[in-house]
Amino acid sequence: MASSKSAKQKKSVATKKSATSARAEEPLAMQTLRGMRDVLPGDQPYWQQARKVLERSAVEYGFSRVDMPVVELASLFERSLGRDSEIVQKQLYTLTTKGNERAVLRPELTSSVARAYIQHGMAILPQPVKLFAMGPVYRYDNPQEGRYREFYQAEYNIFGEQDPVLDAQVVQLAHRVLKNLGVRNIQFSVNSIGTAETRKEYVKLLKAYFRSKKTKLPAQQRDMIDKDPLRIFDAKDDKCMQVCAGAPQLIDHLDKDSRDHFRRFLEYLDELNVPYMIDSQLVRGLEYYTRTVFEISASDTPESMRRALGGGGRFDGLVESYGGTPTPAIGFAFGIDRVIGEMRRVKAKRYHVPQPRVFLAQLGELAKKKSLPLFAEIEQSGILVAESFGRGALKTQLRHASKLGVDLTLIIGQQEALDETVIVKNMLTGTQETVAQKRIVSFIKKNLKESSKLVKTK
RNA sequence: GCGACUAUAGUUCAGCGGUUAGAACAUCGGUUUGUGGUACCGAGGAUCUGGGUUCGAUUCCCAGUAGUCGCCCCA
């Protein structure tokens, strides 16, 4: 007992020492930062599938891919999302660079895409310009189910066209992506929040209304009356909802153009066969939205309805607010993590990771040397081949091979290395034959074809 | 920012105020020479961190941290 204890003490001393010598006093925990996580090999089938479909749909709908830096100027988002918005106020990962730039990890993609559109003069391209972007975004929020501090968005944005047919096309695209991913039972919530000017008018009306009902509102919402009365609609408690039910509806106070835009949007939507409902209280938190806004959620359980899989809308004023020429735009973003969560929930089809069907085993130093180029030759011919070069015992390698479920195992030992042959063992039947190394690729191809026929006829 | 619950091998879980903290799966090795799947044998590997109560804490209490889940917000 005494010896084991002292061994433990030694161990802890050793780790402490190495940690301090490596860096400061901070403990080195083998752990991700809060709200961050690793996407492990076992998770990849869903991620691959999601990425594949998202990218393919982008191509099918005529979007070109853009990738922007993860780090941007803080002012980029302060301008677009609004200085008072929750994201800017509380959730930004901020950093000051050595060059004294005020930088942030991007909390969303749209602002970056708009920046790129202006910076690279895309206004001279034939309009509309359709851009697809996908990557990580960062928000310092409290993690919980379906909410992480680093999460992935995939965005489809269309610049330079104000026709509501595009609003509908974007909805169609979102619907199509989810359908292709095996996520059925989707529900769209749509609304129009008019232009910045009409909203201003409406907000006045709304403030007046909420002030008249002030006593019926909880303190938290009361504070929001003057700051951001639209957000009171998000409140979930009964009192608020009662008050909200009687509030003037933005939809009734839209300017004529916005109303017209919304009407036509809905008409197009009706042609599409996508399930939608008008949610006149849908207000999205990002300041840049104008007119059309919508969210997508799974519709089969109340929980899944609450957590949107994606959302978007028009941002006709954004490019101009950045100093670009006035450019209407529409777009939407998927939360990839949530889409994958939904795929898991409904047990959607996932990407089939290619499995090797051939294993290369070697015995002895000479064979090991020869097996290296042999591996390369087979792999270059397009055959996935597994190996276990680090191990010596043939038994172990065969065990590994059968665990991998390969059809054929190639065995090369001292004798075969000298003869320039390979033993090919059929793992199903156990039979084996010796093949010249020169012929090995064609031999494997022929045999794999036959064994997949066997599998099919089974 | 607020609240609830949880924390034991890589994973899923046992367990007890007091000898050596168990199991399953996983990993690695072995059951004679250059032949896998099954079986048998074996090995390594854990009480989140810091305080407190106690003769003694992995167990009880407090704090921190992290995870999970709500609220808020959003994707």
Image (cartoon, coloured by chain):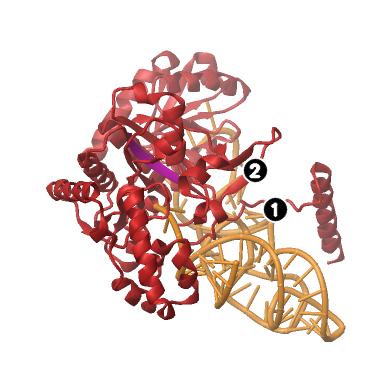
Nearest the viewer among A445 and A327 is: A327
Residue where numbered disc 2 is placed: A95
- Secondary structure that dominates the magenta span: strand
Mark linked to residue A175: none
For chain B, give the colour: orange
Image quarter of residue A163: top left
Q: Is residue B2 left or right of residue A214?
A: right
Residue where numbered disc 1 is placed: A29
Question: What is the span of residues highlighted in magenta in the rendered image?
Answer: A152-158
Nearest the viewer among A316 and A150 is: A316
What is the three-letter code of the residue carrying label 2? Leu
**Mark 1 vs mark 2, CA separation in Å:** 23 Å
State the SS at label 1.
loop
Q: Residue at x 38, y 75 (%)?
A: A212
Mark 2 belongs to chain = A
**Vertical comparison of A130 with A15: above or below:** above
x, y percentage for residue A81? 47, 48
For chain A, give the colour: red
x, y percentage for residue A397? 53, 37
